[in-house]
Amino acid sequence: MYKKKRGQVTVYIILGIIILFLAILLFYFRDTTEKEMSMQEIVRAQKIPKEARPITNYVTTQLDDATKKGLLLIGMQGGYIYESQGGPIPDPIDEGKDFIYDYNDYAVSYGIYRQTQESSYYYFPDPPRYPWDNFPCIFYEDCVGARIMLDLGSFGTKNLPPLNGSNPSNPSIESQLTLYITNYLKENIDLTIFDEQGFDITYGEMNVSIIIGEDDVIAFLEYPLIINKTLTNKITKVSYFYTNPQIRLKKVYKFVEKIIKNDIVDITFDIDNPNNDEDDIWIEKVEDAYKQDDLVVDLIVIRDNRSMLYAEPYTFQFARENRNPALHLIYLPILPKGNVQDYITKEDINPKAYDADEDVLTFTYDPNLPYPVANLGPDSRFYLRVTVDDGVLEDWQDLVILVIGFISQYI
């Protein structure tokens, strides 16, 4: 009887948690929807006479242009709008280190950097201990699964701005868009063009608000205008303007965030595998989009086919710095019994490796294999370095092969 009651209590607790979660979710979506509706209602509630509509349409068009151009820059530059463009991010200086240019001359920021000693806390960024001792664990899937839960990126550092927030030291996409739109409007709105049409317009301060939704972006402008038609001395007061591009920015951002996390945690993750595409959001990898000396950078392009901007699918792209391949720990079995074998061969070593950037890997040996060991004699040592490289970066392991009596073995 006691066990039955305890089981019932557990069920009620689980149901309570589910109900609470659904209530929070419903409240969130209702709150977002109500904000959108209230903005629309505020704008539509303004009584604008026909003769003043060219002015309000002009301001609304400028707001719409600013919002769409800001969204374009955010997507094409990996989530950043630079100071020279009207945003808060200092202009990048060093191509290759800070950014790469794409084919349209946008300065694309890095979404993934190679690990360094300064950014590594739980693993080793440099060979031969890279990425961690005994890589890749006995059961690789279990090891990676634990790292995903703990958000331990062993194969890169994420460089993606937050979607929301107001931290000046790390401007969010929301705050960047707000500043960009404000600066754009201040620079481009010129109400004196209506002077010749017989209007005398006074205006107040601009205040821009942004809401980034799952399926759209809302830009709301508070801009008090007093419009006086001098011929009739009719005065119209207008304060609120609104635009609503159907760009799924939040959904695209979450998608980008997920693939970056997978790419820096799981070295076997193939970033442009079609199986990673979802909800009409596609990934394309432009391999070696930038290459200079030992720095190789891929361009990762995300396209949302349900969000159209300037008659093209909305694009969010970022640069990905090349990372070292990772050599499996070579477990060294005892060689076949009997007389000392004549040669150590590649088949004896049988190296394996992964590469975080899906590059083709090459194995080399120092000294070259096959290597003669029959004449070494008993109780001799043979040193061998096994190296894997992707054409630029490498990982290696040093082996010591012992010849003991009439049996060769590795340590």
Image: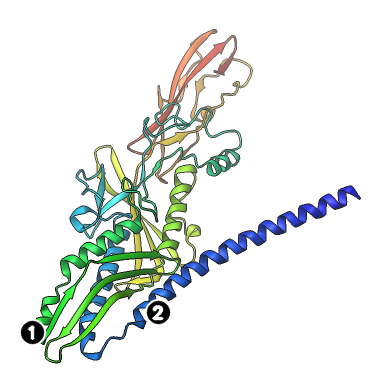
On the question of residue 344 being in view, the answer is yes
Residue at image location 51% in from the left, 58% down from the top: 275
| Quarter assignment of residue 69 | bottom left
Residue on which the image places disc 2: 41
**Dot 1: element:** helix
The image shows a total of numbered marks equal to 2
Image quarter of residue 41 = bottom left
Amino acid type at circle 1 is Glu
Percent x, y for residue 330? 53, 28
Q: What secondary structure is marked by label 2? A: helix
Q: Position of residue 101 (x, y in %)?
A: 23, 53
Vertical order, 306 against 233 (above or below): above
Q: Is residue 274 above or below residue 347?
A: below
Name the residue tied to disc 1.
Answer: 196
Residue 197 horizontal side relative to residue 302, left or right:
left
Where residue 401 appears, x then y in whole percent? 51, 17
Question: Residue at 26% across / 56% down in the picture?
Answer: 81
Disc 2 and disc 1: Cα gap in Å? 32 Å
Q: Is residue 57 visible?
A: no
Q: Tell me the crowding category of disc 1: few under 14, some 14 to 19, or many 20 or more residues within 10 angstroms, Cα based.
A: few
> Sequence-wise, which precedes: disc 2 or disc 1?
2
